[in-house]
Image (cartoon, rainbow, N blue to C red):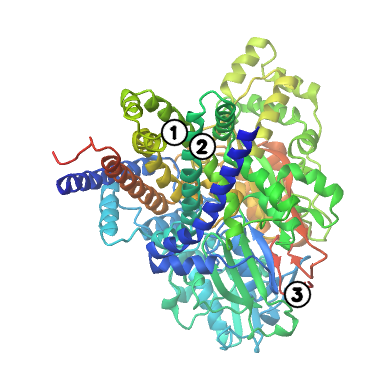
Amino acid sequence: MKKLFILLTFVLGVFVLTACKTTTTKTTTGNTTGNTTGTTTVTTTAPVVSDGYLVFSTLSDPQTWDPSHNSAADGGHIINNMFEGLYRATATGIELAGATSVDVSTDLKTYTFHLRENAKWSNGEAVTAGDYKYSWLRVIDPVKPSEYSFIMSPYIVGAEAYLKGTGTAEQVGIEVVNDFTLKVTLINPVPYFTQLLSFYTYLPVYSADGSALAAGWEKSGTVVSNGPFKFKEYAIGSHITIEKNDQYWNKADVKIKGVRFQIIGEETTALNAYNQGDVHVLDYVPLNQITELNATNPDFEIQAQIGTYFYVFNMDDETIGTPAGANGKKIRQALSMAIDRTSIVENVTRGGQIPATQFVPDTLSFSDGTPWTVDYGIKATVQKDAAKQLLAEAGYSTAEQLNNLSRKIKLGYNSSDGNNKIAVALQAMWKENLGLNVSITQEDWAVFQDSRKYGDYSIARHGWLGDYPDPNTMLDLFTSYSGNNDSQWRWENGTGFEHDTVLNPGNKAFDDAIEAAMTASGAARDNFLKEAERILVQEEVAVLPIYHYNRLQLINSSTVDGVVRTQMGHWWFGDAELFE
Amino acid sequence: MLKFIIKRFISMILTLLVISVVTFFLMHTAPGNPFTGEKALSPVVMAALKKEYGLDQPIIIQYFNYLKGILVFDFGISFHRDGIPVSEIIQKTYGPSAIIGALSSVFILLVGIPIGVIASLKHNKFVDRMSMFLSIIGVTVPSFVLATLFLYYFNTKLGWVPSFGVGSFKHYIGPALCISVFSLAFVTRLTRSSMLEVLQQDYIRTARAKGLNNFKVLFKHALRNALIPVVTYVGPMIAGLLTGSFVVERIFAIPGLGQNFTVSVTNRDYTLIMGMTMFYAVFLVVAIFLVDIVYSLIDPRIKYES
């Protein structure tokens, strides 16, 4: 025992010695790695205290927060607070922001926006119609187009042609009438056009010096913005800080000094930091904590989101696709009926999701405002007998026949804890309810994308989050010309889809319904969209809806107030207040 | 010695060149590309992006362009952080990783070697058994478990250390300890077994027979020889520690280098993959080179003149 004591004292002694040594180590590191590292260490190691700044935790370094080129939610949160468009998204819809009024022509194709004359950039200059035109052309620039150009080019006159290099910028229907009047001409009436205007792709950037907008401009100290906050600092891997913009037209309402987007990649660490008061707002938590948080923390909230987690069937598959005719459809129906969606959300995902019995989530609504709820005969629970019956009708009832079928079905998904659990659950349900032994394969995301795109599967995991609050954001995924239509369900194979040589005539009616909806309005439009969804999920059974996504949030109500999350899920801190 | 150094330097350059070729071509053969996002890009946008980043050219040309860049220390722009050069990412995230790596290296050497020596001297006694038991735990318990436990006890329960990030000395204790444990246990075991072997040697008996005191026998004759295998391990170990750990940095939310290794691969961020691989490779070959030099200092029989 005495020896152990001596040993422990020794270890302790060495530890103290190391502690003393560290000061020297630290300085040496700074010196030997050169000046740059030395100074960086200073900036990145600012102590984590909020000092008037609201701290919001984010998973990783955003790729960009350039409004025209952003394509991800994390960049979207920063943009929503640094920039301001003609409209601003609110918790329930949108409101005028950069514009004070709008005149819409009777054919609903021409919008004339009257801009707010006291709106200024952070350098004091006025925000003009020219800035908007410049920024929007930047999105559809044929040389360096935005990944999100698809949210603009199909709607505005001449935009698609300019993007593809067959038209000119002058032919695009964006007209600067005067400094504060902007006229936009659309190809067809777009009921959700004003919703799109609040989306980051349509937000303006400062145009006076175009050459300053080289890649990465938004991350430097020279970035000019027009929202309630302006850029302050970016420390790679650590945080992005934005501070109050004194030139903002409504600066009187901005009560906090700024926002610090703190990068914390590990959910457990982020939740712990939140519990310690080091983070004020958090929108991701470890999955295994959801049940407990829901029961014990009143600040924890689960909200329905506009999006669906689903599987796509390979419609070109010889066994389960349209080449197998009516039998293929029966197999697809049987597979869909044999899964227990309620059990998946209650026992597998356990995040309070809603089982999906349709493709469009009911967080979206019909033109009269009622929730989008339609019965296509898909049930949340298992219909075992009916499923077995359908499979038997398709010619698979004996053990040998079922084994044959099992061998031909290949289910694929991209590796993630959640996807894995769901795939295993589906496999078990099909085994128990249908006697099928389906093989499942997981792939790395980048690899899986190609497998899914080129149809190297029978059933593949898919998921979609809407970009604007209209059913079209979900449905136009399955048009024959959609780059995301990975079910191989196409009646013709245009440019980019040369690999899809097996054509599915059933997709024509879907395309037609979507196209008819483009020129219709009100209840007539609703009916076209509903018809499209019916063809997708009921008549052709191209998808297997599992559940509708939801989102989580923790807002520390004892230290922060006035934090808003928009309908599409972006955070707004312009009205936030901190009390400490 | 000079000749040896020049020879080694040339072979180091060759090694790095081979590493760069293998990584570059393997990376490009991996399925997927940097632009595979949640939403598929239209062919027009994809073509424009590929052109912008030079991915539309033949792979051989791409490789030579890359090599040309390296010669002027231009490692390209990251594909997944618009406009940020890879060299800047490495430069700015290197600091925290180096501090943690240096702290843990010092800790491992100052604790591991003495414990190993003591254990070998008290062979099969309680202290020996105890330290070997602890070192087995150290080798087997993964660092993410230790890191999570550390945060739970010292932050959540006791509030002694901050919840995440870098800044003060307190921020570094957890990451440095957790990153150390595996190598600490390994170094201890290595020192012990190597010492045990050396202590059996004839020349130790001779030294004792000459009447040298115990201290001189142990430290001048035994330890010096026993350290050779330890030095072999410690060289690459320090290179590894100084370039950061993905797991530990992630759990403690350290803005360090380690995260870039894994993230760059899943993102297919070609330029960052290359930058990180080359950065680590340089560390490694230099560490191995230094190990060779240290050999000759410890063991007079090893000479590089010939």
Q: Are marks 3 and 2 on the same chain?
A: no
User: On what subunit does the disc labeled 2 rest?
Assistant: B
Which kind of residue does numbered mark 3 sit on? Asp
The alpha-carbon separation of the residues under discs 3 and 1 comes to 62 Å
For the residue carrying disc 1, how many other residues have a C-alpha within 10 Å: few (<14), some (14-19), or many (20+)? many
Residue B171, compared with residue B145, is above or below; it is: below
Side of A224 where A435 appears, left or right: right
The chain holding disc 3 is: A
Decide if residue B37 is in sight here. yes
Q: Mark 2 and mark 3 in contact (Cβ < 8 Å)?
A: no
* CB atoms of marks 3 and 1 within 8 Å: no
Residue behind mark 2: B115
Q: Residue at x 53, y 65 (%)?
A: A44
Of labels 3 and 1, the one closer to you = 1
First-in-chain label (1 vs 2): 2
Q: Residue at x 25, y 52 (%)?
A: B64
| Residue A23, horizontal then vertical, whole percent | 50, 61
Residue A197 image point, x, y percent: 64, 70
Q: Which residue is mark 1?
A: B191
Q: Are marks 1 and 2 in contact (CB under 8 Å)?
A: yes
Give percent across and percent down for residue A119. Answer: 64, 85
The answer for how far apart the CA atoms under marks 3 and 2 are is 59 Å
Q: Which residue is mark 3?
A: A575
Q: CA distance from mark 1 to mark 2?
A: 8 Å
Q: Quadrant of the C terminus of chain A?
A: bottom right
